[in-house]
Image (tube, coloured by chain):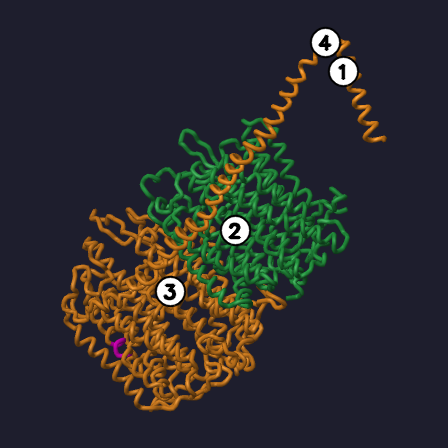
Amino acid sequence: MTHEFVTNLVWLVPLPPLLAFALIVLFTNKNKALSHTVAISAAFLSWLGSMIIFWSAVTTEHFGKEPFALSIPWLPTGDTWLRVGVLIDPLSAAVLFFVAWTILMIFVYSVGYHNFGQPAGDHDHAGLPPHGATVTDEHGHKHTVLSIEPMYSRFFAFIGLFAFGMYTLVVSDNLLTLFVGWEIMGLCSYLLIGFWFAKPSARAAGVKAFMTTRIGDVFMLLGISFLYYATGTLTYREIFTEETLHVLATVPSGVFGLSAAGLIAILLFIGTIGKSAQFPLHVWLPDAMEGPTPVSAMIHAATMVSAGVYATIRMFPLLSAGWHEGGPLTAAMTVVAFIGAFTAIFAATIAVAQNDIKRVLAYSTISQLGFMIAAIGMGAYIAAVFHLITHAFFKALLFLGSGSVIHGMEHGVYHTGNHKVDPQDMFNMGGLRKKMPITFWTFLIGGFALSGFPLITAGFWSKDEILADAFVNGHLMIFITLAIAAFMTAFYTMRQITLTFLGEPRTKEAEHAQETPWTMTAPLVVLSFFAVTYGWVGIPEHFPLLGGLVPNWFHEFVGGTLAEHPPVLEFSWIPLLTSLVVALGGLGLGWFVYRDVKSQAEDKFQIPLLKNKYYFDEAYDFLIIQPLIWFSEVFVSKWMDKSVIDGILHLFGPATGGIGSTIRNYFDVPVVNRFFGDGSADATYWIGKNLRPIQTGRIQQYLILSMVVLFVVGGLVYFLLLA
Amino acid sequence: MNFPILSIITFLPFVAAVIMLMVPADRKTEVRGIALATASMELLLSGWLYFQYLTGHMTGYQFIETYKWLPALGISLKFGVDGMSTPLVLLTGIVMFTGVLISWGVYDEEHHISAGIQDRPREFFAFLFLLAGGVFGVFVSLDLFMLFFFYEIAVFPMYLLIAIWGWVKTREYAAMKLTLYLFIGSVVALVGALVMYWTQYQNTGVLSFDMIQMESAGFSAAFQYAWFLPVFFGFAVLGGIWPFHNWSPDGHVAAPTAVSMFHAGVLMKLGAFAALRVGIMLLPEGAKQWSWLVMAFAGVAVVYGAYIAFVQTDLKYMIGFSSVSHMGLVVLGVSTLNHDGLVGAGVQMFSHGVMTALFFAVTGMIYDRSHTRQIPELGGMMKALPFAGIGFIIGGLVSMGMPGFSGFVAEFPIFMGVWGRQWMLAVVASISIIITAAYIMIAIRRVFFGPMPEKLEGHISPITTLDKVAIFTLSSCMVIIGIFPAVMVPMVETGVKHILDLLGGA
């Protein structure tokens, strides 16, 4: 594989899913089998390309210095063209690896989740979830079975477009195309959350997600404008040069005493806050679970939200401009670290009190993203990337696992025919380990990875590295906050596993749950493989016993992205012990508390404040949305536009009329009309009337008159003019 | 002498209008046929013009034609296009073509289906073409007198089109409001233009309305400071500049569909374009002196229009106020007087033109079938009119400035340009992005994806093939520019370079 060949290949990676989107929309949407074949083939091609690129990147010496890069002009501005280009450096190669795997798994899983091969539903129609079909078996018994999704093809078109957005974002070499991919994904998440558009909750959630992330996007756009204005380029490799960064770090921005680099980084980071659902723009992600499928939930909860973190990691040189390893954090870094750490613990507390299996995972995602953001904020670059990737694997696994659980539960619901039972409520489950063994074991692996179960799971290694970084570099507050959050993570994860799989079934539906088809379980197995092994590529060198057994490839490889390779972290026992204690302690406590909870009433953590997510939705409605509507409606529309501007205009009407009637009554009628108009007629009439007597008809009189006039006029002319 | 393409483009609609008026009134299909044939020809001609300019890598004024008209006063019929006006000529061709398509409509007495223009199509199309001819004339005129001449020709038929074929409830009010606003604006600008004409004579001894000549008329700085505002704002009224925007939403609502398309799609561009060409290009020093004021007004318009659109329940009012907001972006881009802002404004004029034309076309199709434009009374249109729904959503995405569509290609440089001039204003204007997304999303959610009200069930007849062609034409323009900005941006850039030269390379 030559360097040139691979570079050209990078261009092609995002295209197959886009092509699939177009093909499905235009041609194959009537044929469900063809549609998913097209989509999965496209995902496979992109996956294949990504794997070749990844492999070439790994095997290239000093890859960080010679990345795959190519660009062409796209949007001309000024003398330079805004170039669109691709760049695969160690960071994007590593990210591309997990993106390709998770996307391919989602595509395959969707086939099973949307009940391919099942009959069409009796009353199903587009816009609503399938309601099941009645089939008669050979004995003449009627059964209700799962029915195929009515908009099956459309779903594959949407996730194809989504995949295009994600790949575009990862392979971009500049902020412009990153933003393009970013927005395409935002659009897709709107389409996917609102996929079952006939459900009001899904429609509302779609709009909410779009709007909330949009707020972040606008700040990001401003950040991009500022960056372009300050540097004249949006290409990473041109921005991240020493001179440019130095200038940006020293020029004051004039806002809050930040440097230009700091302000730009914060503006861009607000985009991430929206996309990665960080506090205070986190409200959309849990609602997105209202959306139809765990597949789409997983798409934007495990994949799309990673894009936000990826963008912040990308901007790390800008964020940390003026900072040196071990020195005090810059103002922008402090903001990022604070938001991340706060979100990590804040979301973890809410997750404890949720009963919907998908919502627990949603809050857990918010919390875990907080870990990564906090890591970036305190300069733990590699730890953040590491956790981003391991998390993507195990969270994808958990989301797909929860989808499998829900699917199995739905089977039970059709069996009993009691549609009042919510197949997503964990208190309706229990004992599923026997019914769904593959789902159980894979979910267990995912859950343990999330909790950071020591040594085996990937989550342990990445989370441990963040904690170690925080501790060794002396960010004690962050360390303590994250440790508590990690403890809660283990606790709510075990709560979830216990309530769902362990014990005895709490409902009839759970008793009749059934393992899902291979298209759904196979992706679970693949992902659980990575959820375990991916941790082993990044075992710290100085780790007792294990350190050095497997070389710390990850640190070596990803570290090459930065201009200066980050130093290897000193080993310290305290964070390691903390990791062990919080993970095992949280898991143990979770099992102990929930091992024989029979119903929701017995759960001590159903605290209203947590269950209602600290009332953020209500507060935003009261503080932002209602005032906005009032301002628009009452102030701008009714008062300013209708009363003032139109009012002034409507004054012109009467005023013009007033002027008109004044002129008419006091000038036009008496002066123009009476005096000049009628007056001239009257005068003519009067003259005519008085001259009438001389019209006698006698020729002699006329002659005398003529003579008199002639003499008078002649005399006048003579005396006045000639004399 | 080359092929006189600009004269043909300009005068063909007038000829067609006369021919149509000679057809007997009951021959509706023939009239429509003539209209569609003419409009298609216009589209081809303007498309050819655009293609020539683009692929020939032309710069400056091209396709120039000059005919003496009133030599004693220095008035001649001088036509020519540059990088700024060529896209607008194409835009007019597109809007004309699609406007005729969607006015064709269907009529089925038995099923109470009546869409498009069924009442006196002969007169309707004749007036519409008069309007179109005037619009073409303004975009291609290089003579200030002729520019005014065509400007008034373009404004006058609007009154009749709205007052006769408009929405019964507000048509007289709206037609009157619109006409008064526009005439007053143009009179103010006309005074300025005559003063410029006279001052040029005093300065150089040349009696001419030729705008290329006027670019070097040597107006003193004091003169420019004094006359820039009347000239710029006089034209900008037609561009919907705040606070002289109120004629526009009222006019949109009252106008029949094709007229709304023309009104928002092209006519408002006329104002912005003339303000740029006469105000900024002939009085550059004045522009530099006053650009802060124009920026402030445009900045208000951008946010103000968005806020009002956000609370409208009438679909047409919503689009009308969104036009105020988007045209505010055009003027904002123009007033930055820097490269990025001007390029963005040039693209935004085209992009907004096709976008609102599409919005109004779809709204008209919905209204003809449901007899309501109230957003809360609508629903389920995605299922009933899927093609129209997809068109509206594409328009919505353009409106929000979504990458991959022309709106992004336009708004992104505008924001860059504004940031370069005054970053605070960029922050303020960015509020509109959020609010725009909100009202578009809410409208789409309710009208297209919400449940269909019972009384509409079964009354929504499918749209015609002609309607689909119109929607496809408009949507594809936005997508093509969004994906390949190179089909338009370099051309606009050549126009911008000239403006920057006039501004002294600022």
Tell me which residue sits at (19%, 54%) in the image: A418
- Is there a contact, CB below 8 Å, between mark 3 and mark 1? no
Shade representing chain A: orange
Residue type at numbered disc 3: Ile
Residue type at numbered disc 4: Gly
> Nearer the observer, disc 1 or disc 4?
1
Q: Is residue A203 left or right of residue B17?
A: left
Q: In this view, does B109 lie to the left or right of B31?
A: left
Q: Quadrant of the N terminus of chain A?
A: bottom right
Q: Is residue A342 above or below residue A513?
A: below
Q: Is residue B57 above or below residue A545?
A: above
- The residue wearing badge 2 is B240
Which chain letter goes with mark 2?
B
Q: Does the magenta stretch include residue A86?
A: no
Please state which of residues A88 and B191 is positioned toward the viewer in this rendering: B191
- The residue wearing badge 4 is A697
Residue type at numbered disc 2: Gly
Task: Tell me which segment is drawn in magenta.
Answer: A486-490
Q: How far apart are marks 3 and 1 (CA)?
A: 116 Å
- Is there a contact, CB below 8 Å, between mark 2 and mark 1? no
Q: Closer to the N terminus: mark 3 or mark 1?
A: 3
| Labels 1, 4: one chain | yes
Q: Where is residue B18 in the image (x, y as percent from the top left)?
A: 63, 33
| Labels 3, 1: one chain | yes
As helix, strand or loop, the secondary structure at mark 1 comes to: helix
- Residue A489 occupies which quadrant of the picture? bottom left
Which chain letter goes with mark 3?
A
- Residue B485 occupies which quadrant of the picture? bottom right
- The residue wearing badge 3 is A299
Q: How far apart are marks 1 and 4 (CA)?
A: 12 Å
- The residue wearing badge 1 is A705
Q: How far apart are marks 2 and 3 (CA)?
A: 43 Å
